[in-house]
Amino acid sequence: MERAPLCITALTGLAPLLAALLLGLGCATGGGASTDPSDPNAPDTTTGPVSAQAPEPDASLPNAIPEDEDPDPALDPAQTGPTAGDRAARAMEGLLLGAVVGGQAGPIGAAVGAAAGMVYGAITGNLPVGGGGGGGPVASERDREAEMEEELERTASLETEIEEELRRQEELLREIERQEAEGIAPIEAPNQGELAERADPRTAPAPPELRELPVGVFEEESVVVTAGTWSNPKQVKALQRVLDADQDGAPEEVRYLDQASGYLVRTEHDRDYDGKLDAWTDYEFGAVARRSLDESGDGQPDVWEEYRDGRMVSREVDRDGDGVRDAFYTFENGSLISERHDADDDGGIERTVYYQSRRIVRVEEDRDGNGSLDTWSYYATSGDEVVLRVERDSKADGKVDTFEMYAQLDGQTVLTRREEDVNADGTIDITSIYEKGKLVRREIADPSLVPL
């Protein structure tokens, strides 16, 4: 910063003014007799000292001082008010203080402040701040010094803050210039549509991003990972980096880099900082390929995820923590296309949901739990996500024998028509018509089925 040289130059220019002012003050307040020979009132100095008889004090006056007592210096009129020395000292201190305070406004402010402080101190014998000091000369001097030190500290602190802010602004400008030079588009806040897509569970999630951390925060060592340790098909010579930020002996993060290629091959995390690892991620060519999670906190994985081309392609979950995977989700082109559920943990799938453009189009179920599908529900492909038709295998013979059609009425899904193949000959025997969800008519094609 160029402030200090400018201020010193401005203060140097005030030196002649200060000298003249102090000389005038000394002549005006020094109390000495005039030595000008042309002055008729000047004493004759050529004949030696002249003795003068001091007048005797009048005892009748209330303020008269007895001859046998020394006068109180505090009552001596000559001792009231600042002396020439006080004025000179205050002028110099005022000049310095004014320069420091005015320096916050630049070189011109420093010069103006110095001049104002000097004149004020020379005339009044006090500083512009701190007053006359009612605690005596020593106390006043200490107060003035303390105030000057505080002001200097505040000034230095302010200058430091300004310099830091300027440095941050310069770094920001350099970063913007670098991005512009490299053609990097600025990061824009996501719009409502993007936020809704991210929150949609039927959108394939992106892999977790790894925090950028300086290498110095890790403890490094070379390790050899045998084949099969992490589902790695062959031995890996890796550089292990361990982050234990709280120094409790339990790492919050562990990274493994292949020493031959430099690629990241695996990370392990303690996401809830309870001292136990609960996320394990495998990488291929530096990109996330697989991840397993411990969501229950028992130390065992219960979620398994796979990623490809920057998106999740499958997710399998052990929902009840028995070690058996019972929910399976499949993604294609960034969207969920199916989910399968094993409701009774027998290893079979009792319910499968199919999606198209992130909307349900069909649901297949094994409602009696015999291992064979017996119910198929079809949904509207436009408008609201509602069921239109249900087909059933009511006899568990692998053939659909019942067809139900549905419609929307006052926001409710109601049955409008049911067709049944009662004798399993492949033709509809009974047709039931419903209005507002209630049976109003039944048509029977085979008279042998009457009465029902």
Image: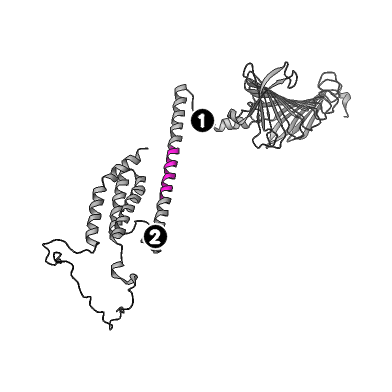
Note whether residue 54 is visible. Answer: yes
Q: Nearer the viewer, residue 132 or 106?
A: 132
Q: CA distance from mark 2 to mark 1?
A: 60 Å
> x, y percentage for residue 8?
31, 43
Q: Residue type at mark 2? A: Ser
Quadrant of the image containing the N terminus: top left
Q: Residue at x 62, y 22 (%)?
A: 310
Is residue 228 in the magenta section? no
Q: How is the image coloured?
A: one colour
Q: Amino acid at mark 1?
A: Glu
Question: x, y (%) of residue 183?
Answer: 47, 22
Q: Is residue 27 left or right of residue 288?
A: left
Look at discs 2 and 1 and give the one toward the viewer.
2
**What span is in magenta?**
150-165
Of callouts 2 and 1, the N-terminal one = 2
- In depth, the one of 444 and 264 nearer the eye is 264
What residue sits right under mark 1 in the picture? 188
Image-quadrant location for residue 205: top right
Query: Which residue appears at 30% of the width and 71% of the height?
Result: 76
Badge 2: residue crowd in 10 Å (few <14, some 14–19, many ≥20)? some
Q: Which quadrant of the structure image shows residue 146?
A: bottom left
Q: Which residue is mark 2?
A: 140
Provide the secondary structure element on which disc 1 rests.
loop
